[in-house]
Amino acid sequence: MPRAKPKIVRPSLTKVPTGIQGLDEVTGGGLPKGRVTLVCGSAGCGKSLLAMEFLVHGAVRYGEPGVCMDFEETEKKLAANIASLGFDLHELTKRKRLLVDYVAVERTEIAETGEYNLEGLFIRLAHAVKAIKAKRVVLDSIEALFSGLTDSTILRAELRRLFHWLEDHKLTAVVTGEAGEHTLTRHGLEEYVADCVIALDHRVTEQISTRRLRIVKYRGTLHGTDEYPFLIDREGISVVPITSLALAHKAPTDRVSTGIPTLDGMMEGKGFFRGSSVLVSGTAGTGKSSLAANFTSAACERGENCLYFSFEESPSQILRNMRSVGLDLERWVKKRLLHVHAMRPTSIGLEGHLAAIHKLIDKLRPSIVVIDPITNLVSAAGTYDVKSMLMRLVDFLKVEQITSMFTNLTFAGDPQERTAAAVSSLMDTWIVLRDSKPNGRPTRELFVLKSRGMAHSREVRELIVSHRGIELGMALKDAAAATAVAGHRAVEE
């Protein structure tokens, strides 16, 4: 009888949550408890902010008081800096949830005496930790602390002593460090001593900035290894926890109306699959935005929450323009069912847009999302980057089972079955709008190019947009239909 294989027990590393949106997900639960994490990067990339958020969230959310030993900024200056993010450092200090200790390190004094060790720092830090029973510690930044040391042997020894001291006192620590020319840190030593290393990057490409975060190493645990875009806004740091997702999302079978009964009729009378992605493409003035607005209005009518991202028009402009086609979107805005978020594509980098979209979706939890139009994103980045970003966005929306509609502007003379970022393969349903002159007069036409998983009509129909709303005319497949179109157009305004 074969002997059963012994069960292998893998001890899991204990982690503490940072409370920073997305970071705990990509780290698999947070930072290593009782160990040192190095956060490194160039000036202005967000190191100090990440470290302070780690302390503040620990004190406020997780009942873990923290000490910040700062070698560059005074408590007054630090409090002013993070107040803009809604953190009241003075109040937390008053309640003994945080303690900020500014330590001025004079490089010239160290150079003159030639002596340097951390004994004084350990005494000072131990006193601060004991005063508030701290569980978390931040040292910002390590360059300032060791600025007077030039002997790499002494530097390495003192670094090890510092990190071991923090671990011996069971403190979960974040140490910040400036990026070196060819190394993660200026001295090139810190990354070897720390158990977890997080690199922040702030790059500018064609005058558009993008922030990215990468977990360089994390001893004793699995972690994401990709570069993750992150955003710094009024609420602090938020990390987008994906660069690509496995195709493992569920495919709902229930349907959601397009908002146009005749268009629903072209798709088994039921409309789109809930959680699917829909592309509406067409030349300028063919009614793409009107179709998208009509879709969101119908969803609001059902009491569903909708999020509309506009890269071309302001919210006020959208509400005004849609009134001309019989859509009163303002009432849904007032009822907080419709949320319009407008921003120029070049205002932030492409990954910044992805992070902002993630954050708003997480906050508002919509069932319908509209991106209008995706074509403008090409002005913020190359076609490949836009497609990569949209792929991640579509994956994310499908995982969340959010029905999404993307509009795409095609240009006169371009093939109809073509999109600016070549994203058609990502879409479950593709609706094409175009201008035509079947009887010598301009006519908007609509047809469903594809719709995965359902029978759908391939008829070409007239799209009638008037002050009474949006509807579809008869199929334009023969002269009789064309004649009928003329009759329909007569009522269009």
Image (cartoon, rainbow, N blue to C red):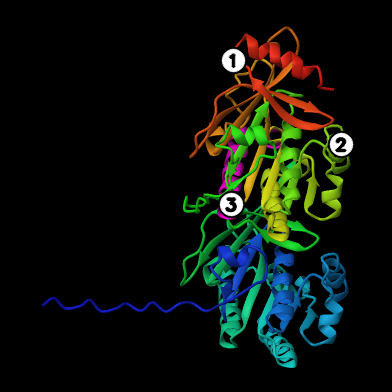
Residue sticking out furthest to the top: 440
Mark 3 lies on residue: 396
Report the quarter where the C terminus lies.
top right
Residue at disc 1, secondary structure: loop
Q: Residue at x 85, y 81 (%)?
A: 91
Pinpoint residue 10: horizontal percent, then vertical percent: 38, 77
Residue at disc 3, secondary structure: helix
When the figure is inspected, residue 411 is found, relative to residue 68, above or below; the finding is above
**Nearer the camera: disc 1 or disc 2:** 1
When the figure is inspected, residue 476 is found, relative to residue 347, above or below; the finding is above
| Sequence-earlier tag: 1 or 3 | 3
Mark 1 lies on residue: 477
Front residue of 100/389: it is 389
Mark yes or no: residue 179 visible.
yes
Identify which amino acid the numbered label 2 is placed on.
Answer: Arg
Q: Is residue 398 magenta?
A: yes
Mark yes or no: residue 189 visible.
no
How dense is the environment of label 3, judged by Cα within 10 Å: few (below 14), some, or many (20 and up)?
Answer: some
Mark 2 lies on residue: 323
| Label 1 with label 2: CB-CB less than 8 Å | no
Q: Residue at x 86, y 49 (%)?
A: 331
The stretch in magenta equals 377-401
Identify which amino acid the numbered label 3 is placed on.
Answer: Phe
Q: Residue at x 61, y 47 (%)?
A: 393
Report the quarter where the N terminus lies.
bottom left
User: Magenta part mainly helix, strand or loop?
Assistant: helix
Hey, which quadrant is residue 343 in on the image? top right
